[in-house]
Amino acid sequence: MTTADTPFSSMPPLAPDDGFAPPPAADDAPIAAAASSDAAAPHAETPATGTPAAAASDAAAPRAGTPDAGTTADDAARKLAELEARHAEVSDAYLRAKAEAENARRRAEEEVAKARKFAVEGFADSLLPVKDSLEAAIANPTASAQQVLEGVQATLRQLASALERNKVVEVAPAPGTKFDPHRHQAISVVPAPADAPQPPNTVVAVLQKGYLIADRVLRPALVTVAAP
């Protein structure tokens, strides 16, 4: 048999655009339906651990035993307020103490200045009666010699009392007293008197009295000293 004699030899060839497609196999229809159903239905499974959705869920949920962010902020604000109040209290106490110290220093300086300025106030007050007595003696030119002598003696007693009240003490060593270079000043060295022999380096006579003020030498006594 030749090709021209076959029954299908007279049929034209099929073109690919004629819309003809082979029918699907019977076994492929259920698989396609199942795949379509799986694509349309949402997944209901719980996200597995380690996926991005699980990490976001774990980050959003507070962990047990971990302080809440709001609680921590409140505690920090409360502590800050307490520290600010304490700082204000300490600053106020410091300023008060500084002002008190400054006032005390100023008062001390004023007292020292007054003490220096009026140091001789008491001594001057004790000398006023002496001046009054001398003026009274001068105001009576017709007084006798005896009266003048008595007035001078009374004035001398007033002066001695004034010096004593101000702790001014006489230094008048008796003959035979050991020479003290801290309170005595030797004017000369003389032989000891024949009628009253005394050891060397002792006071023979006082030429001028000395004075102490509060155990400090105001003026040494001028004396003569026995020769060795």
Image (cartoon, rainbow, N blue to C red):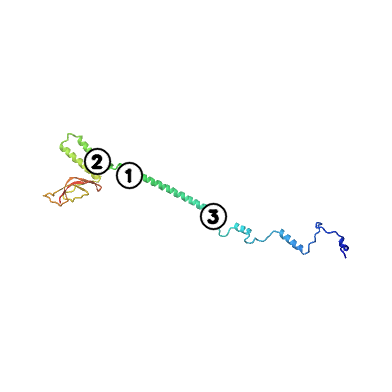
Between circles 3 and 2, the one closer to the viewer is 3
Q: Earlier in the sequence, mark 1 or mark 3?
A: 3
Determine which quarter of the picture holds residue 145: top left
User: Helix, strand or loop at disc 1?
Assistant: helix
**With 36 as the anchor, is 195 left or right in this view?**
left
Q: In the rendered structure, which amino acid carries the disc numbered 1?
A: Val
Count of marks placed on residues: 3
Task: Please tell me which residue is depicted at 73% across the width and 61% down the height of the picture.
Answer: 35
Instruction: Quickly name the residue at label 3.
Output: 72
Q: Which residue matches tag 1?
A: 112
Q: Nearer the viewer, residue 192 or 96?
A: 192
Which residue is the extreme one toward the bottom?
1
Q: Nearer the viewer, residue 125 or 211?
A: 211
- Under mark 2, the amino acid is Leu
Residue drawn at 17 percent across, 37 percent down: 148
Residue at 56% x, 55% y is 69
Task: Please state which amino acid type lies under the numbered disc 3.
Answer: Thr
Label 1 near label 2: C-beta < 8 Å? no
Element on which disc 2 rests:
helix
Residue 127 image label: 2
Q: Nearer the viewer, mark 2 or mark 1?
A: 1
- Residue drawn at x 19%, y 39% as measured from the top left: 152
Rendering quarter of residue 63? bottom right
| Residue at far left of view | 195
Counting from the top left corner in percent of width and height, residue 27 is at 77, 64
Look at the numbered discs 3 and 2 and tell me whether their residues touch, using CB distance below 8 Å: no
